[in-house]
Every structure is written in structure tokens, then in C-alpha cells.
Image (cartoon, helix red, strand yellow):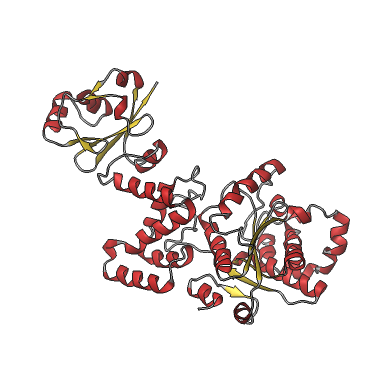
Amino acid sequence: MNLYAELEARGFIENATSEEIPKLLEREKIACYIGFDPTAPSFHAGNLIPLMGLAHFQRAGHRAIAVMGGATGMIGDPSGKSKERNLLDPNALAGNVASLKKQFERFLDFGEGNAVLVNNADWLGAFGFIEFLRDVGKHFRLGEMLAKESVKSRLAGETGISYTEFSYMLLQAYDFLHLHDTHGCVLQAGGSDQWGNITAGIDLIRKLRGKQAYGIVFPLLVDSSGQKLGKTSDGERIWLDPTLTSPYRFYQHWINASDADAIRFLKMFTFVPLPEIAEIERELAAAPERRAAQKRLAEETTRLVHGDEALRAAVRASEIFFGGTIEGVDEQTLADVFADVPSAVLPSARLAGGLGIVDLLVGSGLSTGKGAARRLIEGGGVYLNNVRVESPDRSVTPNDLAAGSTLVLRQGKKNYRLVRFED
């Protein structure tokens, strides 16, 4: 299967500027670019679409160019936005650029020579205003710019569009021209909201260089419930940075995908071969309770974004809630695992000299009284860090902390209590 057919089969292609693109990708190796504006210090799950798209180009032997919007990020792209975003100051933007560079390396191999990471501040920052208007702006007609959907939708809204954002199209178009001249780039890809910007670049290359360039756009995905990809049901972002979204929570986001989404996401966000995905789809249909598609999806995406060690930790953490051993888990992950269970805070001093398990059960609210606590323990129904407590005379010490200042109590199978000790 050639690259274009592969991308189509995986659901990446929403539209293309020319029917010649499949033939082009089959007969020669080309350079393709995708731009990323550094509006945050981390990519989120929604950014996996362009990241994976660019990775497919490199894996097929094409030259993948990732463009950091060090300049355009200071302007703001109106495409797909209902209002103008707050502009970032140069220091914040530079910090975001530095952070995102590390995440690119999870998807692209910059050591092979057929992948490159560039920053459009390097060429756009060198332009003077008059020079840019003379050399670039004169080639754009106002009527054509106003007809772009990204501009029309903003003009129809309450906030309108500023000249700053209106000019964004020219900057991105020049990016394409610059990359065409310096890297031989003939194809730009991006989300479907980038169609107007991409076609503007194609027109500029045709006018100034007399050459044909191309564009493809990816769908802007939502899940089966209509939730925008990259967010939880309550609107919280799923970040690729482990300090913003722990590998455990990242893993859980994908393992909780619906049956309707799991296969689609497997195709788009993993490199699992399509015939193998077809087998997983048949298994899902035959035994949906096994959640084979969701498990494979969670494993592959977590391994890709965070690595094998983080995947193993996420799997171990996922098993904790079902009685698995609590070991090798950091305090934040433990808090994520038990985010929805009751918690209690006790003074660290009570633990320092040894705290009786009976007093701990009462103090945490897991038992109503000492007599009831003793009966629970003697009946074999109390667990400390998922290990059964054998005697009501057991003493709990700092050595029993599962992670940091936290330990886990359980009564029966699912009645948990997270206990933190603080000064």
C-alpha cells in the first residue's frame, strides 16, 4: 500500500488540492511540511493527528519538515477560532518552543536526515514591514482573502477579526514559499481549518516561482460523544507532557475509549499495521467485554508518547484499583488512581511513633468505631496498600507509606480510602 492509500485507509485524508497527489507520492520522494504554533509548553492529544501524519511521511521515505511557529505564534491563527487569542510574549513563546522540541523527537527521527525541525522566526523575523508588504503582500487580493472561510466566519461573529490575525494567512503562505525555496518542499499538510492558509501558499508559489505545489488536510476529530479530541468529558486537556498529564491518566484516557472510537483511534494514533487492526476489530465485535481494541490502543499510544518504562508503570497503576500490588508508583500517580475515592489527612506525628491500624481505620473514616474496626480486621476484610491486614494489633509506621506521604486503605473489594500524612 502506498502512502496516500495508507493515509486514506487510516482516516487522515479529508481533502486534497489535487488528484495528482497520490501519483506524486508514489513516483518520487518529496518534502512535506506541517506547522505547529507553540501556544502552550506541551502538545495535547488533539495534536497527535498532525504529529502522526508527519511521522507517516518520514516512515515512507519522504522528507518531513516540522515548522515551529516562533513568529506566527506571536500573531495568532484565526482559523477555527471564534475570537482572538491572547498574544504570547517572546519569553513565554521561546520557553514553549524549547519544550515542544523534545516532544517532536518521540515521533520523528531527526538523525536520519529526512526529518528536520525549523522555526519560522528565523526567516519571518528578518523581514521589515515595508519589505514584506512589497514582496509578499502585493500578491494577495483582498477579495480572495475575505472569501476564505476562516476569515468569513470571524467577520460574521461578534468580535470580528483584527488586522493582525487577518495578516496570518500571508505569513503562513510565505512559510510555504520559503520552504519550497530552501528545502524543495512541494506539499503542506494540516487540519481542515488550514485549507485557506494552505491554498494561499500554493497560489503564492505559483505566482512567484511558476511551480506547482500541493496540500492535504486532516479531519478535525471528535469522539463518538461529540467531545473534541484531546479533552476529557469535563473539558480537561490531555497533554503529552507527563508533568501536566501523568502517563497513568494518559493511558486511562485511551483505555476508556468507546467501542465506536477505539478502532478509528487505533488507525490514526498508532503504527499497528492495518491487517492487524482488522483482526482486533473482529475480536472486539466477537467479545467486546475483553476490550482488546482499547487495551492495544492505550498500550501503543502510551508507549509512543512516554516510552516503555512509563507504559509499564501505567499498567501497574491501572491494576492497583483491582487489588494489584502497590509498588514503584509515585505519589502523583497514586493520587490520579484514587482521584475519585474519599481521602483523609492525618498529622505526620501520629505515624512517626507507630499508629495502630484500628486507630487508623477510625481516623480515616473507613470504620465508625474501634470495635467495628477490630471485627473487620478479624474477618479478613481490611487491606493496607492492597495487602491484607492479619492482626488488629498491627502498627503502621512511615515504612508502610506507599508513595511519598500517602498510603491506601481498603475495606472489602472496592471501599477505598486514600490517607495522607502532613505536618
Which image quarter: residue 90?
top right
* Residue nearest the viewer, comparing 166 with 254: 254
State the image coordinates of residue 33 (x, y, percent, origin top left). 65, 65
Q: Work out which residue is located at the far front of the displayed protein and give it.
A: 112
Number of callouts = 0
Horizontal side, residue 363 vs residue 170: left or right: left
Between 107 and 42, which is closer to the camera in this rendering?
A: 107
Q: Is residue 175 left or right of residue 391?
A: right
Q: Position of residue 279 (x, y in %)?
A: 34, 72
Quadrant position of residue 184: bottom right
Is the residue 313 above or below the residue 16 in the image? above
Q: The C terminus appears in which quarter of the rendering?
A: top left
- Residue 94 in percent (x, y) is at 68, 45
Which residue is depicted at the point 23% across and 26% down? 362
Q: Is residue 249 visible?
A: no
In the rendered image, is residue 230 in sight?
yes
Q: Which residue is located at x 65 percent, y 43 percent? A: 95
On screen, residue 258 above or below 390: below
| Residue at the image position 67 percent from the left and 52 percent from the top | 84
Instruction: Give the percent coordinates (x, y) of residue 291.
Output: 31, 61
